[in-house]
Image: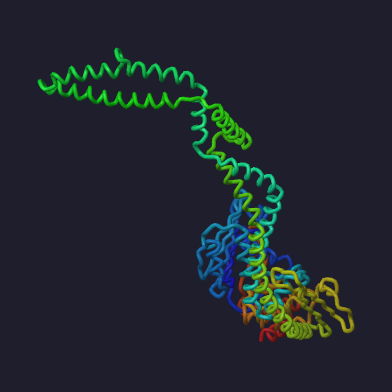
C-alpha cells in the first residue's frame, strides 16, 4: 500500500510530504484546489509521461517519491525478473530535470518507464471517470469473472501451455516454409549431388593427375635424360661407378695406416653404395618409361571433369568441391526427411493441444459455474446503489480457437430498466450508472483477489442522498481488504473515512501554492460542515457533521 507521498517543485506544489495508512482515506477540497495535481504527481511517479510544464520552478528539478509497503503483494519474482532489489518497503522516485530529461528509480536503481508501468499495475489502481470504459472491454470482463471463479491457477497453467503451443506452431510454420523452399530446389540439388557423387572426387587427386600428365607430355625428354644419366653412371671408362670402384681400391690399401685414411675410405664406400642404389633406380625408371596414349587421354578427361565441376560450383580446389558435396547432401537429406520432422512437430502440437483443451474445459466450466453467482452479487450491489432494476446477461460459449485466456467467447450484456432490452454496457448505461457498476465490480474484485491500493477519483459524481451513503458503505467494506483512497465532494462519503486529508490553496509572497494536510477530528467536523452548507457554516451543519462522523 501507499505509505508516503512526497512532492517537490511539481505544478503548484512547492514541497509537501504526507503519510497514508490502512483503511479508507478521504481527500477533499474545493474545486480547483489541486486534487488533480496530487493524482498527476502520483501518476508521474508511477510511470506517466512528463514534460517541463510539470515543473513549478523551471530552474529546479522536480522530484516525486512514493513509499510503498509491498510485503503482501508477492512481488519478489517480479523484482527478480527485472533485476531489482526487493524491499518490503519499496521507494519509487521520479525526477524531471530542468533540461526536460526524466529519470526513474526503484530502491535507488534506475529503471525504465515500462518497468515502472508494470510495477504500477500491481500496486495502485487509480479509478477515474474514463476508466469505466474498461467495463466494455472483453479482457476486463473476463478478468472479473476469473477473479470471482478463482481461476488464476488454471489460467497460469493454460498460459504456459498456450505459449508452448504458439512456439510449436511457429516452429512448424518455419519448417513448412523451409520445406517449401527446399522442394523448389530439390530436383536441381539432387542432380548436382548425384553428379558429384558419381565423380567420386578425392582431395589430393588433382595434384597427382596433373603430375602424371606432365610426365606423359614430356616422355621423350625424360627418356633421353635417363639414358644419358645411365651412360654417365655405368660407362666402363668414365662411368661414375667405375671411378668410385677405383677410388675405393686405392684408399683401402692405405686405410690401415691411419684413422684419417680409414674414415675417408668408409665415406667413399657409403657414397658408392648410394650411387649403386641410384643407378638401380635409374635403370628401373628407364625400363618403365613408355608413352601410353590411352592413359594420357583418361587423365585429360578426368582432369577436365574436375575443372568443369570446380568452375560450375565456383570453387578452386577439390577440398572446396567436397564441402559443396556435403552441403548438397544435407539439402537433399533435409527434403527427404522433412516430412518426418514435420509430422513429429505436428504430433507435439497435437499432444500440447490435448492438454490445453483439458485446462480450457476446466476454465470454461469454472466460469459457467461462477457467472450466476457473480450476476446475483452485482445486481444486489446495484440495487443498494439505487439501480433496483439492473440486470446482467452474461454467457460463455466455448470455441475451437485458442485465446490467451482460454477458448471462450463472452457476451456481457446489461439492462438498467425493468423490461428494457439487454445491450452492451457502453451503449445502454449512462455515465453515472457506469460509475456505480464499476464500483460494484471493484467491490467484488476486492473480496476475490489481492487488489493493490485503489484510488477513487470522484466516483460519487452525479449521485446524492441515500445512494451516496451506500457508495460510502461499499468503499468502507472494500477498505477491510485493501487500502482505499477516495477523492470526494460528498460529506456522506467523507465522514466514512478512517483518515481525512484536505487539499487547499494558499498564497505565499504573492505566489499561489497547493498544499495537503491531514485533518484532526475538530478540523474534520468543520470541513464536513462546510461541505454541507458552504463557507458560512451554520450550527445545524456542525451538528449534522458530528452526526455523520459518529
263 on left or right of 294: left
Residue 156 at least partly seen: yes
Coloring basis for residues: rainbow
Q: Does 348 sit left or right of 132 as displayed?
A: left
Q: Is residue 469 in sight in this rendering?
A: no
Give x and y (percent) for residue 202: 52, 40
Picture coordinates of residue 334, whole percent (x, y): 63, 53
The one nearer the camera, 326 or 152, is: 326
Q: Is residue 236 above or below residue 498?
A: above
Give the residue drawn at x 36%, y 16%. 231
Number of callouts in the render?
0
In the displayed structure, 91 sits above or below 309; it is: below
Q: Nearer the viewer, residue 403 or 113?
A: 403
Q: Residue at x 18, y 17 (%)?
A: 250
Where is the C terminus found, in terms of image quarters? Answer: bottom right
Q: Observer-nearest residue: 10 or 432?
A: 432
- Identify whether 11 is placed above or below 383: above
Which picture quadrant has residue 15? bottom right
Q: In the picture, which quadrant includes the N terminus?
A: bottom right
Query: Residue 139: which quarter of the image?
Result: bottom right
Front one among 534 and 548: 548
- Which residue ends up furthest to the left in the rendered image? 257
| Residue drawn 21% across the image and 20% down it | 248
Residue 133 occupies quadrant? bottom right
Q: Position of residue 394 (x, y in %)?
A: 79, 79
Quick check: 98 left or right of 268? right
The percent position of residue 512, horizontal first and vertical second, equals 67, 60
Amino acid at each position: 500500500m501507499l505509505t508516503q507521498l512526497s512532492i517537490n517543485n511539481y505544478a503548484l506544489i512547492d514541497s509537501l510530504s504526507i503519510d497514508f495508512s490502512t483503511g479508507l482515506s478521504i481527500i477533499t477540497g474545493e474545486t480547483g484546489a489541486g486534487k488533480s495535481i496530487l493524482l498527476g504527481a502520483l501518476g508521474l511517479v508511477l510511470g506517466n509521461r512528463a514534460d517541463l510544464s510539470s515543473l513549478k520552478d523551471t530552474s529546479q528539478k522536480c522530484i516525486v517519491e512514493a513509499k510503498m509497503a509491498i510485503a503482501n503483494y508477492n512481488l519478489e519474482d517480479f523484482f527478480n525478473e527485472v533485476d531489482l532489489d526487493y524491499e518490503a518497503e519499496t521507494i519509487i522516485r521520479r525526477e524531471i530535470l530542468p533540461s526536460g530529461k526524466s529519470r526513474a528509480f526503484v530502491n535507488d536503481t534506475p529503471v525504465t518507464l515500462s518497468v515502472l508501468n508494470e510495477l504500477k499495475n500491481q500496486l495502485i489502481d487509480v479509478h477515474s471517470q474514463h476508466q469505466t470504459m474498461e467495463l466494455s472491454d472483453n479482457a476486463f470482463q473476463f478478468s472479473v469473472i476469473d477473479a470471482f471463479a478463482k481461476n488464476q491457477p488454471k489460467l497460469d497453467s493454460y498460459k504456459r501451455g498456450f505459449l508452448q503451443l504458439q512456439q510449436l506452431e511457429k516452429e512448424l510454420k518455419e519448417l513448412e516454409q523451409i520445406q517449401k523452399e527446399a522442394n523448389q530446389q530439390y530436383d536441381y540439388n539432387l542432380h548436382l549431388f548425384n553428379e558429384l557423387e558419381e565423380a567420386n572426387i578425392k582431395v589430393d587427386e588433382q595434384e597427382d593427375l596433373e603430375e602424371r600428365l606432365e610426365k606423359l607430355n614430356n616422355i621423350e625428354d625424360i627418356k633421353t635424360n635417363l639414358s644419358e644419366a645411365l651412360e654417365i653412371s655405368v660407362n666402363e671408362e668414365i662411368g661414375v661407378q667405375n671411378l668410385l670402384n677405383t677410388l675405393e681400391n686405392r684408399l683401402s690399401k692405405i686405410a690401415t695406416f691411419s684413422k684419417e685414411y680409414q674414415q675417408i675410405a668408409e665415406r667413399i664406400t657409403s657414397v658408392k653404395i648410394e650411387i649403386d642404389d641410384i643407378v638401380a633406380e635409374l635403370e628401373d625408371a628407364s625400363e618403365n618409361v613408355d608413352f601410353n596414349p590411352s592413359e594420357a587421354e583418361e587423365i585429360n578427361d578426368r582432369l577436365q571433369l574436375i575443372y568443369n565441376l570446380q568452375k560450375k560450383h565456383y570453387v578452386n580446389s577439390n577440398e572446396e568441391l567436397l564441402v559443396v558435396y556435403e552441403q548438397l547432401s544435407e539439402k537433399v537429406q533435409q527434403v527427404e526427411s522433412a516430412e518426418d520432422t514435420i509430422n513429429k512437430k505436428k504430433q507435439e502440437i497435437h499432444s500440447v493441444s490435448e492438454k490445453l483443451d483439458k485446462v480450457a474445459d476446466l476454465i470454461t466450466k469454472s466460469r459457467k459455474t461462477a457467472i450466476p453467482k457473480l450476476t446475483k452479487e452485482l445486481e444486489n450491489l446495484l440495487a443498494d446503489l439505487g439501480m433496483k432494476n439492473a440486470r446482467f446477461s452474461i454467457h460463455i460459449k466455448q470455441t475451437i480457437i485458442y485465446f490467451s485466456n482460454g477458448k471462450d467467447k463472452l457476451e456481457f450484456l446489461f439492462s438498467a430498466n425493468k423490461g428494457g432490452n439487454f445491450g452492451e454496457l457502453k451503449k445502454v448505461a449512462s455515465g453515472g450508472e457506469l460509475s456505480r457498476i464499476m464500483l460494484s465490480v471493484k467491490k467484488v474484485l476486492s473480496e476475490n483477489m489481492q487488489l493493490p491500493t485503489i484510488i477513487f477519483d470522484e466516483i460519487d459524481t452525479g449521485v446524492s442522498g441515500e445512494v451516496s451513503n451506500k457508495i460510502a458503505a461499499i468503499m468502507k467494506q472494500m477498505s477491510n481488504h485493501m487500502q482505499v483512497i477516495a477523492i470526494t465532494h460528498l460529506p456522506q462519503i467523507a465522514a466514512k473515512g478512517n483518515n481525512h486529508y484536505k487539499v487547499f490553496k494558499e498564497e505565499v509572497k504573492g505566489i499561489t501554492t497547493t498544499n495537503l494536510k491531514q485533518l484532526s477530528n475538530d478540523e474534520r467536523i468543520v470541513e464536513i460542515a462546510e461541505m454541507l452548507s458552504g463557507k458560512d457554516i451554520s450550527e445545524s451543519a456542525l451538528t449534522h457533521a458530528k452526526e455523520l462522523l459518529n
